[in-house]
Image (cartoon, helix red, strand yellow):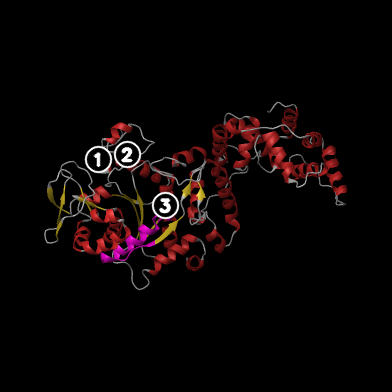
Amino acid sequence: MTDLRDAAMSSKAWPFEEARRVLKRYQKQAPEKGYVLFQTGYGPSGLPHIGTFGEVARTTMVRRAFEQISDIPTKLICFSDDMDGFRKVPTNLPMQEELKEDLNLPLTKVRDPFGTHAGFAQHNNARLCAFLDSYGFEYEFASATDYYTSGKFDEALLIALERFDKIQEIMLPTLGAERQETYSCFLPVSPKTGHVLQVPTLERNVAKGTIVYQEPDGEKIEIPVTGGNVKMQWKPDWAMRWAALGVDYEMSGKDLIDSVTQSSKICRALGARPPESLSYELFNDEQGQKISKSKGNGLSMEEWLRYAAPESLQYFMYLKPKTAKRLYFDVIPKAVDEYHQQLRAFPGQDLKAQLNNPVYHLHGQDAPQSDMVVPFSMLLNLASASSAEDKDTMWGFIAKYAPEASAETHPNLDQAAGFAVRYFNDFVKPTKTYRAPTDQERAALQDLADALRSEEAALAAIAKKNAAMGNDDALPTADFSDDDFLQSVVFAVGKNHGFEPLRDWFTAIYEVLLGASQGPRFGGFIALYGVAETIALIERALAGELI
């Protein structure tokens, strides 16, 4: 344990760097509340999206890293801002007209357009929790509606009432002149309409714990700030929650940097220390636009899991949180293959390297073994070349390539084969564009087919390439089941036909034979798909049957 802690204290992996910042808060004494509190926030104004999951996954990574360097207990709260007013109807929801009738109600009072829960926020909260539970995250779910109405925030709200002027002094300079005239850090919940009102605070009574405001119909009403009668504005609310709960760490998107700054000032005005924070870059969709719950653009968590195992999504979330990433379907195959590459590397690494390996931050030291003897990208190309409609078809090829593998002994590979068929049919097949070969490419493809017909012809192609390059090395052992030998044959044919740079030859192979601009290491593909099958594929392409 000592060696692990020492290594973790010097690791450059970002979760350990974040964890060490949290630990500095308690160098002199442990927290009075008895634990270090990590928090993630979620606004249930729209369906949960993958960015929400990413925040929980990344915060969990920092929490686990903290537990490697400290014996102080930890807790993670996933907090839902479900008392916010419903300001606009997300375009990706049913019952658009009906939902407009619920505008300005707290999200927990908005009807559930899916008819499964008491309210829209409850539906979204349940979906989020179900997904987080399926990943095995350890967290405590918290509802703003519950915390406000049950009195859990009452003490902090009374302090905010007492220090109202200080909060206003922090917020007003950040607002436009017109907004300054009406801004109040307290949002009354109208006893008449149930709406969350954005109206000025006309009077305050600290001794009674009340405020006075004016209803839209002109009536002045006095209500307590406790018991769920008011909700705080976004930035003061964030600060009040930090102060009330003693939050030690919370990360947020780059678009909230100013909010973090202002909320931190308010938190100090309330007499508490703001948490350590990390501003991460945002996810963009395929058009380069920020993903949004209200737009429903980008990937949903469920969509990712339709095409890949959960661990690949966690791996994607680990990578460079301060770098903007395109989050669309085409990132999935790369994430799957990289995740398994890291799994394969993990057992042979020393402790320092293991702590820097992303899979450590997903699995700890008990990282599973990878059984992906065929990369996911290769499975996709196999599905393409074989027009596979199910994973049984895929296994017909996999079993010849890796006879020791089976669905029972290689469950991840079996699952990936099914994902590959689904991904191919949904995304690759509709966009595949084959082209006819040029004269140079046609001659080279014909030679490649001929070289694959016999070991003698294959060795002759390699010998011809060697002679042209002045290479007098001995020829390799011919073996049509060996990826490297087959790659040498493909390489030699390209050289013999004068492709410069040689990548133009491989691009031609992908575009003519697979209908894509890029593809797998082609020697490995031949070994997987089969030599005879590859010859037949080339012949079909040369006959114009693929176009």
Span colored in magenta = 252-276
For the stretch drawn in magenta, what is the main secondary structure? helix
**Which mark, residue 195?**
none
Image point 58% across, 49% down: which residue?
338
**Which mark, residue 109?**
1
Horizontally, residue 384 falls left or right of residue 10, namely right
Compared to residue 314, the image places residue 510 above or below, namely: above
Horizontally, residue 102 falls left or right of residue 473, namely left
Report which residue position mark 3 lands on: 55
Mark 3 crowdedness (10 Å alpha carbons): few <14, some 14-19, many ≥20? many
Report which residue position mark 2 lands on: 123
Mark 1 crowdedness (10 Å alpha carbons): few <14, some 14-19, many ≥20? many
How far apart marks 2 and 1 lie (CA) works out to 11 Å
Q: Nearer the viewer, residue 91 or 74?
A: 91
Disc 2 marks which amino acid?
A: His
One can see residue 482 in this view: no
Q: Position of residue 188 (x, y in %)?
A: 20, 49
Compared to residue 380, the image places residue 484 above or below, namely: below
How far apart marks 3 and 2 lie (CA) works out to 20 Å
How far apart marks 3 and 1 lie (CA) works out to 26 Å
Residue 272 among magenta residues: yes
Mark 3 or mark 1, which is nearer to you? 1
Q: Position of residue 303 (x, y in %)?
A: 47, 38
Q: Position of residue 466 (x, y in %)?
A: 85, 48
Query: Counting residues from the N terminus, which is met first, the one under dot 2 or under dot 1?
Result: 1
Mark 2 crowdedness (10 Å alpha carbons): few <14, some 14-19, many ≥20? many
Name the residue at the bottom extreme.
28
Disc 3 marks which amino acid?
A: Glu
Quarter location, residue 400 = top right
